[in-house]
Amino acid sequence: MDRFFSATGILSKALDGYEPRIEQLKMSEAIASALKNKEHLIVEAGTGVGKSLAYLISLIEWVIDINNSDDSGNRRAVVSTYTKALQRQLVEKDLPFLRDNVFNDMRFALCIGSENYVCLRRLGQARYYGLFDTDEAEPINVLLGWVKRTSTGIRSEVDVPHKLWQKVCRESDLCHGRECRNFNDCFYQRAKAEERKAHILVTNHHLFFAHVVSGWNVLPSFGPVVFDEAHELEDVASDYLGIEVSNYKLRNLLDAILSPHGKGLAARLNWLTPNLSIELGTTVNMVRMHGEVFFNELSERLKDSSTLRIHEKCFIKNDLSDALANLADELKMLKMSSNNDDEEKEISALALRSEVLALSLRIILGQELENHVYWAEKDGRRLRLIATPVDIASELKAQVFDVVYSAVMTSATLSTDKSFDYIKERLGLPDAESLLLHSPFDYKEQVMLYLAGNIREPNTEEFEDDLIRHIYEILSVTMGRTLVLFTNYHLLIKAGNTINIPGLKVLLQGDMDSYRLVQEFREDKHSALFGTYTFWQGIDIPGDDLQCVVITKLPFAVPDEPVVEARVEALAREGKNPFYHYQIPQAIILLKQGFGRLIRTKTDRGVVAILDPRIRTRGYGKHFLKSLPECKISKSMDDIGQFIGIEEFAKIRS
């Protein structure tokens, strides 16, 4: 690998300003070794290591060797990310650079969920049968004009309402495949053809696990996989390897059959007799009624909380499953009256959806799966019932790591207290090789860590007022270019409504979409951005646009959150201390993510302020501090302005 990463290597000749980093070389060599030996590897690579080029070069080298050998069954490799930002970096910057300058014959493809593609058959069907609502006239014209111009058919290119897109996007169980008259023009099928030609497939964790639960039928066959942003794997896997029923899923199913506005499948079956039409409408309305009763009851149970752990079986009367089963039976009978292949396929798909929803509801309410936690969630108008595996590690091992050729897990935050024990246990990889690579940045010179004094602890009544006062004082010094990270939205709103500093704009998460918030923050040097967990990771604001990150509280998960609570109980049954074994390491990894928002390049400079006094006063605080890069530490507010070069600082403070 030295021929790529040395001072006179391939990258130095192709990339302006390239600087050899021993950490990048070590990472690439370790991945190459893992691929050669069919091993799993965990790599923490601090900010600035250049991990994407390190793993991409190793993967491409492996693919080339495989394709030049007799063993070509695994001729592709996968890179899976958590954020769209990293996905875009890979497919718009890193891979094109490597293709144009290093591996000229290398091919890559972006793999996204099929619902992101417009379906020409469904679009034509919706137009022919008038399935669009009257208030959708303008977005329909936008959509139709875009379809004539687009070469990809991907939703991100066009701005139309979600409700409209749901009527025209590809849905896997409604796809006719090669039998579709639009097959040759199908955007999704063209994308799949490109994927089959590719050496490197770039996807995301959500689609990867959708691939796993589908029986490995979403992506083309591949050999090794690199999970970048691997600290998110446990949570994403938990979502996909569990079961969920929601009022939104039910509504979408029923609207697809017969919406309250008279749209849907039933409106297109012109051979339906009046009696059959009435019977189907009555059955759909019966399911809708039982659904309203069921989810109203669930909402009432959740009126005092956004989440609720369900301990007892059948805690809500379930007439909905029987109603859904009756709907499925009626759809199957209806199918027998059709003599149109398109109609039969759609009717079968909707019948199967009804059966799956009915069965999922019975399984969750009956708590039929062992080693699962059962819980409910209310998020705005969305209500969900969920069964989540408590021990996701065993599921990951059996369904992923025992199956794939080789897996590399990488992130800037995988170790805790310089150990990989936590992440190995959570992912079910006790014997995986590991490598800890520190950032090449000079944190001692680039960062000051401010540890606040004179703040009462979070379990006191005075904490919130102390915290807001401290944030006010810091913002009065920085007057902008400050990211303030909260652990709950309530406190974010309270602080945002309380703090009023002339000349300073306070941007709050929720005021607009996250992308626009970050853009406005970058453009206005006299603004502060207040965010919760969305902003602890995944956002990249290099340079002088960000000079201070304020961490309001150590990011411990809410202890009575159902999945956390169940996993704590499971560890206690095993005789382990859940706080030190699970809750502290989990919080350390998220704290490292928040800390990592500040320094993105070797010339960045600024302050990280941690306002939670427990990092100083509690014995476990040392574990958090030891997990952060070594930097200057101060307990004086005066040092903040001086470190980031605020002129006339004394005058400002006075």
Image: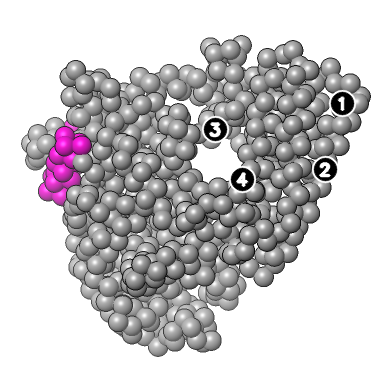
Locate residue 354, reporting x and y percent.
Answer: 68, 37
Q: Which of 449/190 is in front?
A: 190
Q: Identify the residue at image location x=34%, y=23%.
A: 198
Circles 2 and 1 in contact, beta carbons < 8 Å: no
Residue furthest toward the right?
274
Question: Is residue 28 found inside the magenta-colored segment of the image?
Answer: yes
Locate residue 118, reporting x and y percent.
Answer: 59, 26
Label 4 Cα neighbours within 10 Å, binned few <14 / some 14-19 / many ≥20: some
Circle 4 — which element? helix
Residue carrying label 1: 276
Q: Disc 1 versus disc 3: distance between alpha carbons?
A: 35 Å
Q: Identify the residue at image location x=54%, y=25%.
A: 153
Label 3 amino acid? Asn
Circle 3 — which element? helix
Label 2 amino acid? Met
Residue carrying label 3: 116
Q: Earlier in the sequence, mark 4 or mark 1?
A: 1
Label 1 amino acid? Leu
Residue carrying label 4: 360
State the quadrant of the N terminus: top left
Q: Earlier in the sequence, mark 2 or mark 1?
A: 1
